[in-house]
């Protein structure tokens, strides 16, 4: 369980989670707290979907997962990282209409400005970058 009221560092926050279904709500609580601390709450809806999908994939590894949330220096981007210990790389699926799984990375691809993966000791890190909407000119 995560202490969702923990203060976020302006340079980012990271936590380890057990690979259980309760990890997703705990990760979203961490996200909400961090975005509030960084004055980026408008990203929550999109970021929560992206984070939940990445965490759901990582939970399948069966080992402790790591979640990192990092704002860009100008607070225009949010970088989400999920580390797992599973071999292999993430691959977007082409699910059939009646398939129950396989749409997570399609959502991430649609919602994120950029996403990808990189190797990490004993596994990989899957990341996504979300961009804040431009402020209207006034």
Image (tube, rainbow, N blue to C red):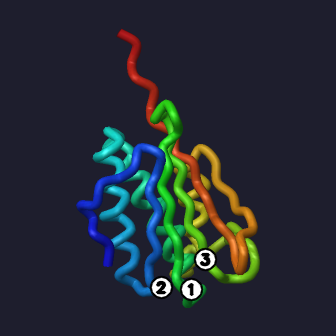
Give the foreground label among 1 and 3.
Answer: 3
Q: Does the CB distance between marks 1 and 3 fall below 8 Å?
A: yes
- The residue sitting at 56% across, 85% down in the picture is 60
First in sequence: mark 2 or mark 3?
2
Q: Nearer the viewer, mark 1 or mark 2?
A: 2
Give the Cα separation between the discs numbered 1 and 2: 7 Å
Considering only vertical position in the picture, is 10 above or below 3? above
Q: Check whether the beta carbons of the residues at disc 1 and disc 2 lie within 8 A of each other.
A: yes
Marks 1 and 2, the one that precedes in the sequence: 2
- State how far apart marks 2 and 3 are (Cα): 9 Å
Query: Residue 92 at x, y = what percent?
Result: 68, 67
Q: Nearer the viewer, residue 85 or 102?
A: 85
Query: Where in the figure is residue 7, as x and y percent of width and height?
Result: 30, 54
Which element carries disc 2, helix, strand or loop?
loop
The 10 Å Cα crowd at callout 3, few under 14, some 14 to 19, many 20 or more, is: many
- The answer to which image quadrant residue 88 occupies is bottom right
Q: Earlier in the sequence, mark 1 or mark 3?
A: 1
Q: Position of residue 56 (x, y in %)?
A: 50, 76
Locate residue 40 relative to residue 113 in the image: left or right.
Answer: left
Q: Residue furthest left?
A: 5
- In the picture, measured across the screen, residue 138 lies left or right of residue 15, that is left
Q: Quadrant of residue 103?
A: bottom right
Spatial CA distance of label 1 from label 3 is 9 Å
Q: Which residue is mark 1?
A: 60
Residue bearing the label numbered 2: 19
Above-or-below relation of 11 to 61 = above
Vertical comparison of 84 with 79: above or below: below
| Residue annotated with mark 3 | 84
> SS at mark 1?
loop
Q: Are marks 2 and 3 in contact (CB under 8 Å)?
A: no
Task: Judge whether residue 98 can be spotted in this image.
Answer: no
């Amino acid at each position: 369980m995560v202490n969702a009221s923990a203060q976020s560092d302006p340079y980012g926050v990271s936590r380890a989670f057990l690979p259980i279904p309760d990890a997703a709500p705990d990760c979203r609580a961490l996200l909400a707290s961090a975005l509030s601390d960084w004055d980026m709450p408008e990203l929550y809806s999109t970021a929560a979907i992206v984070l939940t999908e990445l965490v759901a994939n990582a939970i399948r590894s069966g080992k402790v997962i790591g979640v990192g949330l990092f704002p860009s220096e100008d607070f225009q981007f949010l970088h989400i990282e999920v580390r797992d210990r599973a071999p292999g790389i993430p691959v977007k699926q082409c699910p059939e209409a009646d398939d129950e799984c396989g749409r997570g990375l399609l959502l991430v691809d649609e919602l994120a400005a950029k996403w990808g993966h990189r190797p990490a000791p004993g596994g990989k890190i899957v990341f996504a970058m979300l961009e804040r909407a431009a402020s209207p000119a006034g």
